[in-house]
Amino acid sequence: MKQKMKSCCFLLFLEILILLSGCNSYNNDKSANTIRIGVALYTQDDTFISSIVQNLEKIAQQTENKDLKINITIMDGKSNQTTQMEQIDQLIRRNYNFLCVNIVDRTAASVLVDKAKDADIPVIFFNRQPVAEDIERWEKAYYVGSKAEEGGKLQGQIVLDAWLNNKDIYDKNNDNIIQYVMLEGEPAHQDTLLRTEYAIKTLTDNDIMVEKLSSDTANWSKSQAINKTSEWIKQFNNNIEVVFANNDDMALGAIDAFTNAGLNIPLIVGVDAIPPAIEAIKNGTLYGTVKNDAYGVANTMLSLILSLYNNEKINLKLEDEHYLWLPYEIITIENA
Ligand code: GAL
Ligand code: CA
């Protein structure tokens, strides 16, 4: 019995030794040529964000070769800043090489930048833009995204062109004024505030008269947009001439609401150019959208990461030392 115990202990000891040495050489090999990227999302439940992630995974796979592996870990912040912060702590503890952060609360970036700085892990924010002072806290903090006001201007431009060319169709009550409703994204999101403002400003700057019937948040969500728009349809009868939606999911929700009510669909515009929106443009239910470049965001983040990883000069148009901007683009039946 004693003998058996002894040999058992010895075997166990041997096994631990083998495991340890195995682990070590594996780790060394691995960390030498594996880039580990931690991606923290505000929520996984968002069509446009999902498409950024899909692109990131695809491009990473295409970039890999026999000498380089790219390992991506996705964290779902479930729209909760505390949850997201814990996830980032975990990524830092586990020594990830890079952090890509789609921050839940864009006013809460300072703590996060400081944590990344202390651990010397470059942090790339994307899609949800932190305030400038927070990004400027560290030279290795970046933002990749599009200029929100430009998205708004282009959306306004789509409506302006449609109105000028076909006022007889869109001005239902013939008063030369656009009666509109606005479906807004999350309150305080830069894309909500600036798209809303600049879409309308583009029209008024061009001497178009507008009348806001109503506006409200539908939090980027199609189902919330169906409910909101259905209420407005009841409230304003058939007098809505234009529906501005801060994104495509909400524009598609508005289309459903008009269809459910058995009404003709008015002029509806979105932003993002997600595949179902392109389909809707082709079948004539969505008038137009503004392409938000999911591929570009993913590709730019990965290029930046590779430059930093290889210690190369950053071969991208870095503005104000921290910003990588991607252009928006108008999509209508002409180019869908
Ligand atoms: C916007 C996009 C929305 C939503 C949001 C999330 O740029 O248009 O659809 O994804 O980002 O932050
Ligand atoms: Ca009118």
Image: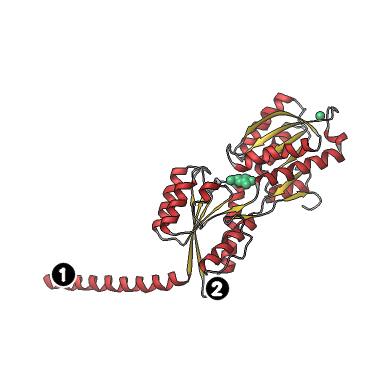
Label 2 vs 1, first from the N-terminus = 1
Query: Which residue is labeled 2 in the image?
Result: 65
Is 308 above or below relative to 159?
A: below
Q: In front: 215, or 118?
A: 118
Q: Nearer the viewer, residue 97 or 241?
A: 97
Mark 1 surroundings within 10 Å by alpha-carbon count, few (fewer than 14), some (14 through 19), many (20 or more): few
x and y, in percent, of residue 67 in the image: 51, 75
Q: Amino acid at mark 1?
A: Met
* Mark 2 crowdedness (10 Å alpha carbons): few <14, some 14-19, many ≥20: few
Q: Is residue 228 visible?
A: yes
Across and down, in percent, residue 259 comes to 73, 36
* Foreground residue among 202 and 68: 202
Disc 2 marks a residue whose amino acid type is Asn
Q: Residue at x 83, y 27 (%)?
A: 173
Query: Residue at the spot x=62%, y=49% of the render?
Result: 48
In the figure, is residue 109 to the left or right of 211?
Answer: left
Q: Where is mark 1, residue-wise?
A: 5
Task: Say if residue 42 shows up in the picture.
Answer: no
Q: Residue at x 82, y 41 (%)?
A: 162
Between the residue at mark 2 and the residue at mark 1, the CA separation in whole angstroms equals: 48 Å
Determine the residue positioned at 67% across, 28% down. 231
Secondary structure beneath label 2: loop
**How is the protein colored in the picture?**
secondary structure
- Side (left or right) of 53 relative to 173: left
Please name which of the two marks, 2 or 1, marks the residue nearer to the observer.
Answer: 2
Q: Position of residue 123 (x, y in %)?
A: 50, 56
Q: Position of residue 270 (x, y in %)?
A: 70, 43
Q: How many marks?
A: 2
Q: Which mark is residue 225?
A: none
Question: Helix, strand, or loop for circle 1?
Answer: helix
